[in-house]
Image (cartoon, grey):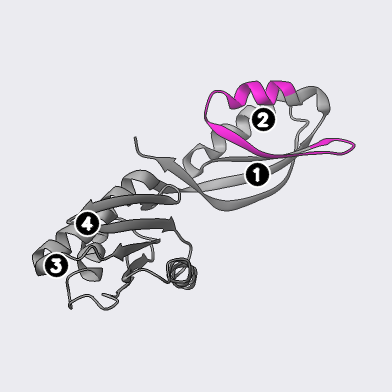
Amino acid sequence: MYLFRTAYKVGEAEYVIEKSRFIAHVQPVESYEEAKEFVNIIKNNYKDATHNVPAIICGNKQEIQWASDDGEPSGTSGLPILKMIADEGLTNLVVVVTRYFGGVKLGTGGLARAYTAAAKLGLEAAGVCNVMESCIMIYTLDYSYLSKLKNLETGGIFKIINIEYTDNVKVTLQCLKEDEEKVVSMVLDLTAGKANLRKKEKGKIRVKII
């Protein structure tokens, strides 16, 4: 089940125009609080910058939206970045564009274009992914089945995200929610019904958009 679209990973990119440097920082987040924390980190790391302009969108349906011009003329920086993110259908991410003024004024339209261009480059560096609902299953099984289970993993229907070696093997699998029954059947067939499903819970999985 599709949940939302966001940045695939942390991304950073630089855009230079009229001697002004614009450095875009992009990070996927789980909450507004995490996003604000990232904004504060960037501001602290770039204290010498002329501006650190943030834009945040959170919530599966983009319910929370916030931006600041951080001293730039009103509506020329934070809002254009925010609008670009929203129009791309992205959420649960934060973008901070750091500017080092190069001495040449860009005008209101030029500022909006420059901040948006930098943010787009940052998103390209981060990549974009669909976040899907997943099923996480924890099995215990005999050591003799582990190599065969790893072979099944190469089919791409599920991923082994953790293995613990005790008296038996404790394996944590993750798959798309719609593949849950198929994976359960595969594990049962592989182990002739001897695998023990210890726990099953909902999760999220990132599917990168190429």
The answer to whether mark 1 and mark 4 are in CB contact below 8 A is: no
Taking 118 as reference, is 72 above or below it?
below
Residue at mark 2 = 187
Residue 18 position within the rendered picture, expressed as x and y whole percent measured from the top left: 17, 56
Residue at mark 1 = 137
Q: CA distance from mark 4 to mark 3?
A: 10 Å
Mark 1: which amino acid? Met
Q: Residue at x 85, y 35 (%)?
A: 168
> Mark 3 or mark 1, which has the lower sequence index?
3
Tell me the element at label 2.
helix
Taking 157 as reference, is 202 above or below it?
below
Q: CA distance from mark 2 to mark 3?
A: 63 Å
Q: Which residues are magenta?
A: 147-169
Residue at mark 4 = 19
> Mark 2 or mark 3, which has the lower sequence index?
3
Q: Residue at x 52, y 28 (%)?
A: 156
Q: In terms of depth relative to the viewer, which is nearer, 50 or 12?
A: 50
Tell me the element at label 3.
loop
Residue 166 position within the rendered picture, expressed as x and y whole percent measured from the top left: 87, 39
Residue 91 position within the rendered picture, expressed as x and y whole percent measured from the top left: 35, 60
Q: In terms of depth relative to the viewer, which is nearer, 194 or 60?
A: 60
Q: Residue at x 41, y 50 (%)?
A: 11
Residue 9 seen in this snapshot: yes
Taking 155 as reference, is 64 above or below it?
below
Mark 3: which amino acid? Lys
Residue at mark 3 = 105
Residue 61 seen in this snapshot: no
The answer to whether mark 4 and mark 2 are in CB contact below 8 A is: no
Mark 2: which amino acid? Val
